[in-house]
Each structure stands twice: as C-alpha cells, then as structure tokens.
Amino acid sequence: MHPASQQTRLIALDWGTSSLRAYRLGTGGQTLEMRALPWGVMQLPETVAGAGEKDGFEAAFEQACGDWLQAAPATPVIAAGMVGSRQGWLEAPYLSVPIAVADIGGNLSIVRNRQGQLIHIVPGLIQNVLLPNVMRGEETQVVGVLSALGKQATLQDEILIGLPGTHSKWVQIRRTDAQAELTHFDTFMTGEVFAALCGHTILGRGMQTTENVHASATAFERGLRVPQTAAGRAGVLSTIFSTRTLGLTGELDGTGQREYLSGLLIGHEISALQDLLRQHERQPSRVILVGESALCERYASVLRAYGFARTDVMAQATERGLWQLALTAGLLKTV
Amino acid sequence: MHPASQQTRLIALDWGTSSLRAYRLGTGGQTLEMRALPWGVMQLPETVAGAGEKDGFEAAFEQACGDWLQAAPATPVIAAGMVGSRQGWLEAPYLSVPIAVADIGGNLSIVRNRQGQLIHIVPGLIQNVLLPNVMRGEETQVVGVLSALGKQATLQDEILIGLPGTHSKWVQIRRTDAQAELTHFDTFMTGEVFAALCGHTILGRGMQTTENVHASATAFERGLRVPQTAAGRAGVLSTIFSTRTLGLTGELDGTGQREYLSGLLIGHEISALQDLLRQHERQPSRVILVGESALCERYASVLRAYGFARTDVMAQATERGLWQLALTAGLLKTV
C-alpha cells in the first residue's frame, strides 16, 4: 500500500434517525475506512446524569471518529442527515426547492464540539407547495449521483433520481450546460406503510416469508399490475384488501400475500409517479436508483413494467455526495 | 306495558370478530332487550380443558340468550357476521354478487347446539372479480336498510349504501318494481389504515386529540379537499406525508394533524368511490349511511363536499335486517 493514498482527507458522516455511518476518505474521495454505529439521532449513547443536552452527540461522534481525528487533527468533518434536524445536534435550516444543486454545498451549518472540532452540517431541502415536502440526507445522495454522472458525456438532459426506502423520494433534475437544477421532488411512504400493514392490520395475518423464489416473483408481478387495471383506480385504500381476499379464495398463499402486497404498493407508487411526471410535462431520459440493492431491484422491475426506459442502480452515492459537498464548500484545500 | 307486546318472537345475534350483540325482538321486530358481550369470534370465553373445539361458541351463546330461550323455548334464533366464517361456529358459504337481495334469506345455514337449539346463520357475500371482495354481516345491514326503505314511495331507483368502519363497504343497489338487486360492492380499509398510520408510523408522533372542535373541523376540511387537487393525484402513499410536513411548517398542530389525516383518507376513499361509480355508469339517487354516528357524520360531510346529493343516516339496520331475513326464511310463523 502506498502511504500517501492512505492519508485522511475528509471525515464524512451519514447520520440518520436510527444509525450513524462514518467514512474516512482519502485522496480523490476514495473510502479508506467505514464504520457503522447504532447511534442514530433518536437513539444516542447514554451519558452520565447532569450531562448537557447534546452530550449524546458528543459521545457518538467521539466513538465514530475520535481516533481518526487524533491521528490526523487537521482533517475537515462533514455530516448529513437527521443530525441537522430540529432533534439533531444543530438545526441546519432547509433550503428551498427549486435550487441549483451546486448551491447546497455553499450553505453548510457549523457546530463546534468540546474538543473544538468543527463539524459542517449539510442542510435539508424543502419544497413548500400545497403539500410541502422535505428531505434530509437524500440531497447528499443526489449530489453524489450527479457528481458521478458529471464525468459522462451528455450534459443536457432530464434525470429522475429514485431513492427507495422507508420513505422513498423521487427527485427531478434538469441539467443544462451551465448547471444542474433540482426542480421538484415527491415523497412516498411506501416502505413504512408496507411495514405497518403487514405488522398491524388484518393483512399481515397468515403472511409468511419463504424461499420459494418463483412463486414470490409471480405474486409480486401480479400485484404490481393491479394499479394499471380499471379496478386499480379504486386506489390503495381499496386494492390492498385484495391481499386478503385472494388468500380467502385460495389464489395466494402466505408468502404470495406478502409479495403481492409489496408489488401492489410499489405499483401504486410508480403509477402515481408516472401521472405526476405527465402533469409536470417531464420525460426523464434516464432513471437512477440509489438504495438497498434488493429493494432497488424490486423498483427497477416495476419501472420496467410501467414503461420507464433506462434504469441504473448507483452505489456509494452518500460518500460521493459528502465528498463533493466538502469540495464545493471549500473544505478540501488539496485534492 | 301490554304483556302481548313483550312476547319474544325472534332472538337475533350480531356476532362479529370482537363482539357479540344479542337482541330479543318482539312483534313487528321491535327491540325488547339488547345485550352487548365481549365474546367475538376471535375472543370467546375460555372453557375447561378437553372441551370441544366449538365450546367457546356454546358458552357465549348460553350467556347471550340462554335465559331468553328458557323463558320462550320455541323462539327461532338467527345470527349474522363472522360467526359464519371459516373461523366461526359453522362456515356459511358465501353467496355470489350480483344477487337479488331477497335470495339471501333463503340460504341460511343451520348449526344445532348442545341443547338442541337451531341457530340459523346468515351467509356472507362474495364478488369474485379481478380483485375479489367479501362481506359478512354488512349484507344483513343492507337487508335492514332496504326493508326500512320498502315502505317509502319510490321503488325504481339506484341506491348507494355506505357502511363506514374498520373496513368500509359501499354497496350498489338497483331497485325495480320486481326486486332489489345488489349489483356490486367495494371495500376500503380506511379505518384500519388510519389506526395503523396513527399508531405505528412516524405520522402518529406528536398527534393529539383535543376538545378544540373548531380547529379540528378546519383541519379535517383541509384534508378532505386534498384528493381533489392536482397534488392529490399522487395518491394516498404520497399525500399522507403532508400530515407530517404541515406539522413541520407549523401549519397543523398535534390535533390538527390527526384530523387532517382523517379527512385526507376519507377524502381519498370518496374520491375513488366517485370514480368507480362513473366507471360503472351509476348515479345513485340517494346515499344511505349505516354505522357509528360520529363516523357517519364525517362521511356525510365528505360526501357533501364531493357533490353527492342526498345522504341519510339510518339506525338499527342490523336488527331490522335480521328480522327481515328471519321473515324471508320462514322462521316467523305469526308476525
């Protein structure tokens, strides 16, 4: 190993509600080391009685990268996610959408810890329309995707970035020669609704997870088609009941019911997304998915079924995004 | 009190998943006595070890009306609801929709208890289309509604019967001079989804219930309008997230968030129902609601907002229905 390539250039934190990931990044943004800790904003390490309100953050931060900073004291630190929310270490005010993506890195908030270390916190985004939308953390992944795409030829186009998860975000990007603009985004609570329906309604009774991959795929496919039918126009509140009735009529077994419901919900999401894109007169030339790979595969197959052209899955968007934001913010003197 | 009016003509049981109501009905179907017991099909009284599989039903039945039968041994007994399901006392097979409403009473199943008493069980209904629908218990309420309407003048019309609850049912009835036909029905899991979202997703955090009736009504009204807007076309999975973001932007307080979500979900249900009626080329001349009165009021206000003409709330549909079904089945010799 070449010693220079091991030099720490940036400490980048992906700090969400239920977990904290710390990255030690080297020259060019390559990941030298990564740590996953359970210290999300809503579950910080316990500190001694009488400690300050933000002591949990101090302790978690120390565990995440205290030794890295000791070894390389001048290293800049950047953090994205719920750490910048009202319940976080420091509230980093939302920036308004539409926004030029390059402007995000120019608006970091700064908190100083007990050791005097500055931590630069990435702001979330808000679109304050009739039904407001917010994100925290996903803006960093969007920056990461665009940074990776920047090296590719075509620069004038429309891109749709999908971030499936507990709450999935769909982000519309318009690229011109001059800049990339984040014009609009939508949120779907599909993952959380799926979990609540399986765990806390009658639909979950008798559901199973199994290894029968073929039967699962068939049931998933059956579900995802429903929103395209006339019956599907009854909407989610109605169509989900068929998960149970197709069990009663013997058409779906326990595993099938779970997979069917998964396909049905993602199908409703993609069907609605398609409708929204038409409303906005948008035709993305490509779709990029970022997220857990099995979930991205599910979404990619539904996107195909709904006629979306080109879908790619991109890894390491968070690390790339944090690196790019640190660059834009001027935190990296020599790269 | 005139002794003859006190004579027991029918014992009618409304036996659901989580509760059992027993009615002692007199001449003309008037309710002489009613008992509410916690013995639903999924929570029967515990019986001694080694007892038969159906002993819980025997015990609950004895508590509900054993003394009534002792006092009037020849009284017929009828029961509707989940008691006729696969998990019930005896499975009463579903009848297929479309169906002439008068045919339901001709298809009762019979179980005999240990004392030799016959219990006549009302069948549920199934509509076995692409997304099958089922009901058990609501068919009896529909019979009750039509029985009450029968005395009114106009007989040729289309009626929409709404049964809001954990799962709401919307039943389309076409009446001619010859008969009333149940042509179609839909299910919406609105009540159960509302409970799951409030209790088991991020939307419930910070929600409150309060006595500020005016603020509640405003938030409910704001929610119910959403599905009519362009943003509402994003569908339930997306619009529900605004419950949280309108809290973040300070537009809704804890109570408001709960009421807003209630209006939003019922609004999505009624909006979808309207779309389904258009698909079926149906224009009901009136809407009858049956259910818990505060909930019926919520639905009535949303129906008004969506331009439905005449909405009435009808009480005692279950007792009326059980009486009418017993009549049709020939269980009541002299009325």
Image (tube, coloured by chain):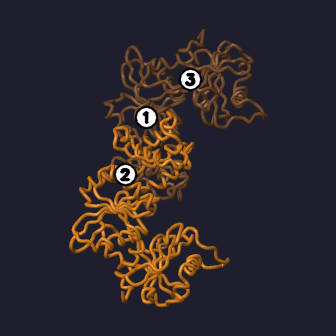
Chain colours: A brown, B orange
Question: Which quarter of the picture shows residue A275?
Answer: top left
Q: In which quarter of the image is the N terminus of chain A?
A: top right
Point out the tag, 1 or 3, that comes first from the N-terminus: 3
Badge 1: chain ID:
A
* Gap between marks 1 and 3 measured at Cα: 20 Å
Q: Is residue B243 above or below residue A146?
A: below
**Callouts 1 and 2 close, C-beta under 8 Å:** no
Q: Residue at x 36, y 29 (%)?
A: A284
On residue A122, the disc is: 3
Q: Tell which tag, 1 or 2, sits nearer the viewer.
A: 2
Tag 2 residue:
B302
What residue type is disc 2 on?
Val
Q: In this view, does A115 lie above or below B191?
A: above
* Gap between marks 1 and 2 measured at Cα: 26 Å
Query: Around disc 1, counting alpha carbons within 10 Å, would you say few (fewer than 14), some (14 to 19), or many (20 or more)?
Result: many
Q: Observer-nearest residue: B312 or A156?
A: B312
